[in-house]
Image (cartoon, helix red, strand yellow):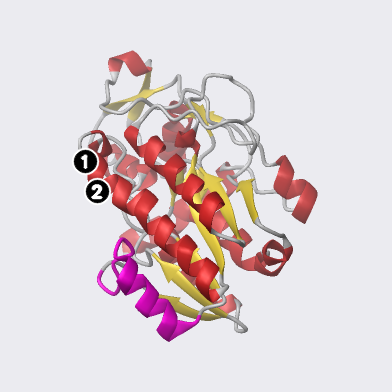
């Protein structure tokens, strides 16, 4: 089975590459913007004509949440246009398309775990474009899966865990918001699920939507505090309300995604968020010491 992984230089793409050795029956082709501009419909068609994949795992995304407020054209091109192109080519070449979406398609005001068929109510430009990409896929792609996740981190690239560790090593105190609630999610959980359950995902008809994060609930303050503790850093984390940390883009206040659907359909229960976080930080410590 040939799998094309887009956005291969990002967090999730790197994690898929790391785990790929455990899946010898899969042939992986990794591409990023340097190899293929997904917003170029002609280039995408030429590439798919050449590769003839069985699966496309779309990890490419415009994820600069605040910048998207003033860069809507580029965010739309990547988060909507690229998904449109991949969906059209799925219809033409018959491959199974997996696209990664986000908790930002919801406003996070209901304060209960969000199920997959809850209406999308994005409040940020980023969330609006990701919702638009989902809509394109549902309208144009005959066979695929939309997987929404949240608060993603890894040993790769830039993310909250690495930022907290970086500044926690040199600062005595940091302020972190305590009134935004969600679930920290390691890319190892997301990538591991996709690769392990790919055949079962492909058995479903049409385009299914799933929620997948690690288990449990935390605020950004809880997340930061745990990072400091696991990293053996003495930086004091001070909880503050969101109003004291203004941002260009509004954040969902409660974005805990319900995982009941994947539990029911696949029997998959994600680990509690502290478990993969501990493993991630242990790996980052080893990297720091080398």
Secondary structure beneath label 1? loop
Does 39 appear above or below 92?
above
Q: Which residues are magenta?
A: 34-52
Residue located beneath label 2 in the image: 74
Secondary structure beneath label 2? helix
Q: Is residue 35 magenta?
A: yes
Tell me, yes or no, if residue 155 can be seen here.
no
Where residue 219 sits in the image (x, y, percent)? 49, 27
Tell me, yes or no, if residue 208 can be seen here.
yes
Q: Residue 199 lies in what quarter of the image?
A: bottom right
Callout 2–callout 1 Cβ contact below 8 Å? yes
Where residue 277 sits in the image (x, y, percent)? 51, 47
Q: Residue at x 50, y 30 (%)?
A: 106
Q: Indicate which disc residue 71 carries.
A: 1
Of residue 149 and residue 228, the one placed in the foreground of this image is: 149
Does 27 appear above or below 283?
below
Q: Is residue 27 left or right of residue 29?
A: right
Q: Indicate which disc residue 122 carries.
A: none
Q: Residues within 10 Å of mark 2 (few under 14, many from 20)?
A: some
Q: Residue 127 lies in what quarter of the image?
A: top left
Outermost residue toward the left?
70
Q: Quadrant of the N terminus?
A: bottom right
Does 182 appear above or below 264?
above
Does 247 appear above or below 76?
above
Q: Quadrant of the C terminus?
A: bottom left
Where residue 60 sits in the image (x, y, percent)? 38, 58
Q: Residue at x 65, y 34 (%)?
A: 115
Q: Residue at x 30, y 51 (%)?
A: 77
Q: Residues within 10 Å of mark 1 (few under 14, many from 20)?
A: some
């Amino acid at each position: 089975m040939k799998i094309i992984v887009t956005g291969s230089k990002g967090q999730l793409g790197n994690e898929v590459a790391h785990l790929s050795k455990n899946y010898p029956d899969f042939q992986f082709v990794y591409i990023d913007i340097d190899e293929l501009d997904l917003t170029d419909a002609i280039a995408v068609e030429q590439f798919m004509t050449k590769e003839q994949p069985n699966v496309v795992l779309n990890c490419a995304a415009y994820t600069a949440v605040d910048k998207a407020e003033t860069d809507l054209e580029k965010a739309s091109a990547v988060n909507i246009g690229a998904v449109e192109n991949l969906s059209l080519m799925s219809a033409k070449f018959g491959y199974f398309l997996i696209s990664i979406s986000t908790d930002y398609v919801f406003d996070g005001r209901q304060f209960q775990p969000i199920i997959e068929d809850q209406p999308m109510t994005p409040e940020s430009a980023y969330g609006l474009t990701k919702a638009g990409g989902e809509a394109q896929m549902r309208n144009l792609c005959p066979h695929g899966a939309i997987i929404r996740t949240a608060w993603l981190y890894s040993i790769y690239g830039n993310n909250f865990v690495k930022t907290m560790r970086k500044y926690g090593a040199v600062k005595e105190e940091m302020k972190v918001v305590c009134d935004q609630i969600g679930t920290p999610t390691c890319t190892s959980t997301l990538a591991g699920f996709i690769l392990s359950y790919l055949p079962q995902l492909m058995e479903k008809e049409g385009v299914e939507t799933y929620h997948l994060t690690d288990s449990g609930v935390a605020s950004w303050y809880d997340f930061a505090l745990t990072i400091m503790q696991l990293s053996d850093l003495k930086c004091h984390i001070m909880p503050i309300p969101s109003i004291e940390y203004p941002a260009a883009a509004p954040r969902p206040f409660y974005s805990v995604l319900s995982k009941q659907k994947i539990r029911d359909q696949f029997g998959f229960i994600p680990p509690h968020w502290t478990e993969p976080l501990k493993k991630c930080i242990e790996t980052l410590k080893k990297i720091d010491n080398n």
